[in-house]
């Protein structure tokens, strides 16, 4: 089928959200959208995240607030 190669490329061309929980430099725990280094799709390689406000299973907002160097990420 002609669309199979297109489906295989889909994860590489979409801007998916990768939720991570982390402890920031201020010592507080946050949930965020991982900011990935260039050339990777692995959220565990993330060194920073945009903070999420609200319930990630319901109504939430990804803020422009960027917290760097998360100490721990959830799996």
Image (cartoon, rainbow, N blue to C red):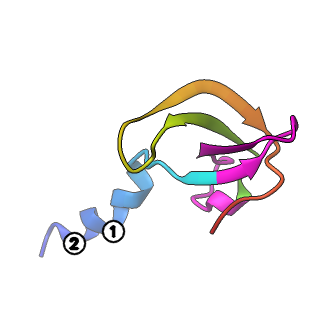
Q: Is residue 32 magenta?
A: yes
Q: Residues within 10 Å of mark 1 (few under 14, many from 20)?
A: few
Q: Are marks 2 and 1 in contact (CB under 8 Å)?
A: yes
- Identify the image quadrant of the N terminus: bottom left
**Is 33 situated left or right of 61 in this image?**
right
In front here: 29 or 25? 29
**Is 34 situated left or right of 72 in this image?**
left
Where in the figure is residue 5, as x and y percent of width and height? 27, 69
Q: CA distance from mark 2 to mark 1?
A: 6 Å
Reading the image, the residue beneath label 1 is 8
Question: Considering only vertical position in the picture, is 23 above or below 73?
Answer: above
Where in the figure is residue 39, as x and y percent of width and height? 63, 53
Q: Count the labels in the image.
A: 2
The span shown in magenta is 21-44
**Is 29 situated left or right of 54 in this image?**
right
Where in the figure is residue 26, as x and y percent of width and height? 87, 34
Identify which residue is drawn at 62% across, 35% down.
Answer: 50
In front here: 9 or 42? 42
**Is 2 situated left or right of 62 in this image?**
left
Secondary structure of residue under mark 1: helix
Identify which residue is drawn at 71% across, 59% down.
Answer: 73
| Residue found at the far top of this picture | 64
Identify which residue is drawn at 55% across, 36% down.
Answer: 52
Reading the image, the residue beneath label 2 is 4
């Amino acid at each position: 089928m002609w669309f199979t190669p297109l489906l295989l490329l889909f994860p590489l061309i979409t801007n998916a959200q990768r939720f991570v929980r982390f402890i920031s430099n201020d010592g507080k725990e946050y949930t965020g959208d991982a900011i990935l280094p260039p050339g990777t799709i692995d959220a565990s390689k993330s060194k920073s995240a945009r903070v999420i406000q609200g319930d990630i299973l319901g109504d939430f907002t990804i803020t422009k607030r960027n917290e760097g160097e998360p100490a721990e990420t959830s799996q």
